[in-house]
């Protein structure tokens, strides 16, 4: 028996999301009295994989095959399932990000293993196997029992955190039968050098109250000072002031960063649904009646065009 | 081209979310149901657009009881040609995906489209399960898709960027914002929808869910908002640094 953490690779490096996956798998394994093993598919630096021991993995199995560098979920699913069986995996853990959303459901179906997608807590293992997840787009939580022998969990990014416990993982290479992929990657476009919104711990977001896309300079400046990602409300992405991938909310991306700064966003229920699990929420709005203040930890009633430049100046002072 | 679009029924986006029966059930009190937004706006509309451009047909499939017929009729009014309702309670994602796979496996669909996730369970999983059960390629969170012959060019979001892929039919995708624009059904569509076939088929009794909801709860409440004066922004930054330890 073992808990298997799916390790994502990009350019021979371990992706940040996988440090949280490893931490979660290790804590789950400890609860079950077993070990946590990482599974990495594709090209990777050995030192990157060894370092996963810091997050509690006892070993990392590396299927070192460049054919697996691209994510064809159909091809990867078979390799992951074979390794689950070979390693005696009982629980398989993914991040509930773009990769996890492509792979976890396939593995669930392939292994007939019940899936909890978007988990926010460790499994409760007293007499069963129950995992809490977000539901109703952040307006509720559901405890879900997995009733099959094998289990798949994908964890909501930032909901568990990265936990360093020390140690180094033994890296074992494994051979695998890899089918030819029918999916061809024609082009990969990196949208910017900024932090991807889905992985960001700090997010600066703005709404229609900024009156036009030309006024986003101060928002981007704040993001730069903080090392934050930028986001926006649905109204803003609908009129193409900002790209669609920045839209957070019920029908956009749901995020749970450590800090969410909402500038000139009124806080409609659909927007709150996508951001309400953020750890700290700051709201800047000139309307004291804006509903967002009810869901905020800190609020400033004031005009964004006055407050935001002052915040940037204060942040610069803090960051030295 | 044969296109299958999977739809499901969800509480309206403005619904107040509450629970009943000792927090084991979602309270339907005063809740109106709608077609899941990404199923309707992106998956269905893109399916209909492809049919309009290339010919073929769009079939809609839904797993549920007759309370789903209203959203199914709406999908027909938007432009689907026919609909199949698999008559069973959608117990969990696996159950739904396995029922749809069981129906779709003999139908020869070229393209199967789901919404990116439902707004009630937010799993983003039925499309991937369906693809696995049918042994098809699956591309999640697609923002653009065009088809020429048997080859689709697909754009999908990845962390911090996007990828442009080439995928041969048949395949499964989940539809994200950008794939299409919402269409409001017109009167002609609504009239035509009444005459389009809605076939109710029995569920496969050999399929069962492998998860179950034990209980629900409301998300933890936040403590009251701490207001800082607009002329004292330094104090906000101090609080974020020293109290919230967020920066």
Image (cartoon, rainbow, N blue to C red):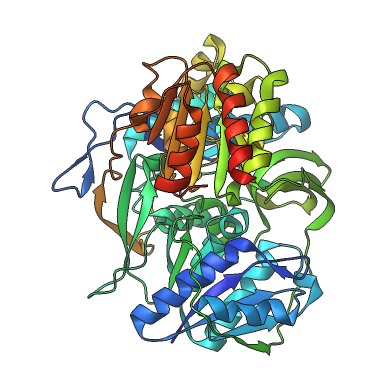
Closer to us: A11 or B50: A11
**Residue at 48% in and 45% down:** B241
**Residue at 57% in and 32% down:** A205
Compared across the picture, whether B221 is left or right of A248 comes to left
Q: Position of residue B102 (x, y in %)?
A: 50, 57
Closer to us: B141 or A295: A295
Closer to us: A74 or A199: A199
Closer to us: B202 or B143: B143
Splitting the image into 4 quarters, where does residue A132 fall? bottom left
**Residue at 40% in and 19% down:** A290
- Quarter that holds the N terminus of chain A: bottom left
- Quarter that holds the C terminus of chain A: top right
Q: Position of residue B45 (x, y in %)?
A: 62, 29
Q: Position of residue B194 (x, y in %)?
A: 46, 20
Question: Is residue A112 visible in the rendered structure shown here?
Answer: no
Q: Position of residue A112 (x, y in %)?
A: 45, 70
């Amino acid at each position: 028996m073992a808990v298997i953490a799916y390790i994502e690779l990009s350019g021979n490096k371990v992706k940040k999301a996988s440090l949280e996956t490893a931490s979660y798998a290790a804590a789950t394994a400890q609860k079950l009295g077993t070990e946590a093993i990482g599974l990495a598919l594709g090209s990777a630096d050995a030192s990157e994989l060894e370092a996963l021991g810091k997050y509690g993995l006892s070993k990392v199995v590396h299927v070192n095959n460049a054919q697996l560098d691209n994510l064809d979920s159909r091809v990867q699913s078979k390799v992951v399932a074979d390794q689950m069986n070979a390693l005696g995996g009982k629980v398989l853990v993914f991040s509930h990000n773009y990769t996890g959303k492509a792979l976890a459901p396939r593995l669930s179906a392939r292994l007939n293993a019940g899936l909890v997608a978007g988990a926010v807590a460790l499994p409760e293992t007293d007499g069963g196997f129950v995992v809490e997840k977000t539901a109703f787009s952040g307006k509720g939580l559901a405890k879900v029992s997995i009733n099959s022998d094998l289990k798949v969990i994908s964890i909501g990014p930032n909901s568990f955190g990265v936990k360093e416990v020390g140690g180094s993982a033994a890296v074992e290479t494994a051979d695998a039968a890899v089918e030819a992929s029918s999916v061809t990657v024609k082009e990969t476009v990196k949208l910017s050098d900024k932090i991807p919104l889905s992985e960001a711990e700090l997010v600066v977001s703005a709404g229609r109250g900024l009156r036009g896309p030309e006024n986003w300079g101060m928002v981007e400046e704040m993001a730069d000072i903080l090392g934050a990602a930028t986001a926006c409300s649905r109204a803003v992405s609908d009129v193409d002031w900002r790209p669609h991938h920045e839209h957070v909310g019920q029908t956009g991306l749901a995020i749970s960063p450590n800090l969410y700064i909402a500038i000139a966003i009124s806080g409609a229920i659909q927007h709150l649904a996508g951001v309400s699990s953020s750890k700290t929420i700051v709201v800047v709005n000139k309307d004291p009646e804006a509903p967002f203040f009810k869901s905020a930890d800190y609020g400033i009633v004031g005009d964004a065009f006055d407050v935001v430049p002052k915040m940037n100046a204060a942040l610069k002072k803090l960051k030295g | 081209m044969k296109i299958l679009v999977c739809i499901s029924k969800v509480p309206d986006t403005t619904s107040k979310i509450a629970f009943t029966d000792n927090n084991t059930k979602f309270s339907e009190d005063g809740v109106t149901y709608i077609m899941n937004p990404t199923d309707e706006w992106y998956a269905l509309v893109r399916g209909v657009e492809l049919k309009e451009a290339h010919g073929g047909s769009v079939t809609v499939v839904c797993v549920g009881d007759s309370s789903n017929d209203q959203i199914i009729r709406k999908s027909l009014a938007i432009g689907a040609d026919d609909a199949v309702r698999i008559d069973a309670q959608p117990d969990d994602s696996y159950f739904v995906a396995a029922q749809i796979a069981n129906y779709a496996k003999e139908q020869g669909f070229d393209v199967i489209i789901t919404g990116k996730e439902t707004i009630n369970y937010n799993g983003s999983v039925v499309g991937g399960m369906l693809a696995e059960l049918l042994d098809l390629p699956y591309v999640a969170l697609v923002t653009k898709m065009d088809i020429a012959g048997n080859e689709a060019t697909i754009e999908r979001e990845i962390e911090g960027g996007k990828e442009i892929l080439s995928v041969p039919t048949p395949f499964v995708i989940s539809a994200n914002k950008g794939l299409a624009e919402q269409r409001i059904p017109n009167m002609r569509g609504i009239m035509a929808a009444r005459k389009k076939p809605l076939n109710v088929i029995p569920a496969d009794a050999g399929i069962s869910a492998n998860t179950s909801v034990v209980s629900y709860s409301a998300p933890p409440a936040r403590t009251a908002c701490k207001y800082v004066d607009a002329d004292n922004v330094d104090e906000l930054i101090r609080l974020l640094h020293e109290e919230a330890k967020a920066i």
